[in-house]
Amino acid sequence: MLCMKAQSFRRSEKVTNKSRYRIIYDQGVWRSSRFFTMITCGNSNGVKRLGITVTKKTGNAVFRNRMKRLIREFFRRNKDLFPAEHDVVVMAKKNMPPLTYQETERELTELFTRKAGR
């Protein structure tokens, strides 16, 4: 059985400030799938961190919040996929349909396992 702490999502595992997001956007490696764009950038604090961007173009507040919950849940359950000492920003694309957790997991897992490239 997995340790509950390993499956949590603590504040230290979140990308929190605007300046850090800018650095990730400028220096990170971009990958895209049908519904998501992922940017990976190294960090110096030795922690896997997740940032989530879901814009108003994606849908109404209920839809945006659901997407954020699904992405956070994916991070919480699949921390082993995330590279150590890296910040990862996951962006939901506009015009995406409502996804189930399984569809979200499949799409994001494919993004992580695919080779880097724009």
Image: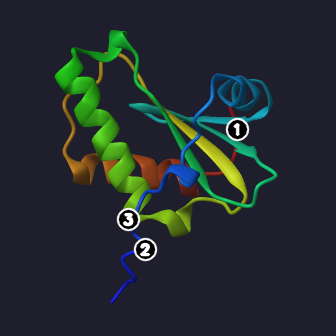
Q: Residue at x 69, y 26 (%)?
A: 25
Q: Are marks 3 and 2 in contact (CB under 8 Å)?
A: no
Which residue is disc 3 drawn over? 77
Q: What residue appears at the point 32 percent right and 17 percent down from the top-left corner?
A: 58
Label pair 1/2, CB-CB below 8 angstroms: no
Three-letter residue code for mark 2: Lys
Q: Is residue 39 left or right of residue 53?
A: right
User: Does 2 appear above or below 20?
Assistant: below
| Residue 66 found in image quarter | top left
Residue 16: image location, x then y, percent: 57, 35
Query: Which of the 4 quarters of the picture holds residue 74?
Result: bottom left
Instruction: Using the image as rendered, state which of residue 77 and residue 20 is in the foreground.
Output: 20
**Residue 34 sits above or below residue 101 on the image:** above
Mark 3 surroundings within 10 Å by alpha-carbon count, few (fewer than 14), some (14 through 19), many (20 or more): some
Mark 3 lies on a secondary structure that is helix
User: Looking at numbered disc 1 in the image, what kind of residue is underneath it?
Assistant: Gly
Q: Which residue is mark 2?
A: 5
Name the residue tied to disc 1.
Answer: 117
Of the two numbered discs 3 and 2 on the same chain, state the one appearing first in sequence: 2
Amino acid identity at mark 3: Arg
Task: Report which quarter residue 67 is drawn in.
Answer: top left
Q: Is residue 25 left or right of residue 66?
A: right
- Give neighbour class at mark 2: few <14, some 14-19, many 20+ (Cα, 10 Å): few
Considering the numbered disc 1 on the image, is that residue within a helix, a strand or a loop? loop
Q: Which mark is residue 44?
A: none
Q: Are marks 1 and 3 in contact (CB under 8 Å)?
A: no
- Rendering coords of residue 55 (x, y %): 40, 16
Instruction: Give the number of the mark in front: 3 or 2.
Output: 2
How many residues crowd mark 1 within 10 Å: few (<14), some (14–19), many (20+)?
A: few
Distance from Cα at disc 3 to Cα at disc 2: 11 Å
